Amino acid sequence: MLQRTYAVAFVGVLSIKHTHQIMSSVMIGRRLYENMGRKGEDFSYSGSVAQGTEIAYGINKNKIKVTAAQYRDLILHFKGKTVEIGTSHDNPPRDSVGEWLQANVTKTQISSYVGPILIFEHFATQVGKSQIRFK
C-alpha cells in the first residue's frame, strides 16, 4: 500500500513536499528550533502521535519510541497552555515539554524532535523561537 511521505523544513516558514513511498514515515528536514541559534539536525520518525512514534536521530540514527499513551498524557497535561519547549540536555526549564518528557518518557532530551512532530501533526503551534502552544 502506498502512503505519502512528507519532507518538511521548519525554518521560520513551513514548507511541505509530497512524495509517494511504500513505507509510512515522515522526514523532517531540520529541527523546528534551528532558528533559535542552534544547529539543525536531521531526524525522521515513523508512526504518528495517535499510534505512537519511533524517532531516529543523530549521526548513528539512534532510535527512541514514544507511545500513543505518552503523547496523550503530554497533550492533556499541557492542553491550552503555551510553554517552553525545553531543549536543554541536563536542565530543561521548569514546566517545559523537555522537563515533562525527561520525567515521563526518557532521560534523553527528545523535546526538539517531539515538538516539531506535535506541530506537524497539528496538536500544537509554534510561538516565537522557543515556545509551543498546545491546542
Image (cartoon, grey):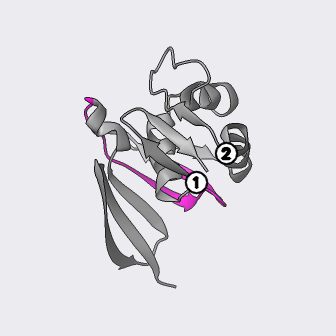
Q: Is residue 128 magenta?
A: no
Measured as percent of width and height from the top left, residue 13 is found at 29, 54
The reply to whether dot 1 and dot 2 touch (C-beta < 8 Å) is yes
Q: Is residue 35 visible?
A: yes
Residue positioned 58% across, 60% down in the render: 48
Residue at x-position 32% and y-position 46% = 42
* Magenta stretch holds residue 51: yes
Residue 75 is marked as 2
Q: Position of residue 19 (x, y in %)?
A: 33, 76
Q: Position of residue 68 (x, y in %)?
A: 69, 53
C-alpha span from label 1 to label 2: 8 Å
Q: Is residue 9 above or below residue 93?
A: below
The tag earlier along the polypeptide, 1 or 2, is 2
Point out the stretch of residues depicted in magenta. Answer: 37-55
Q: Which residue is mark 1?
A: 123
Residue visible at 43% across and 76% down?
4
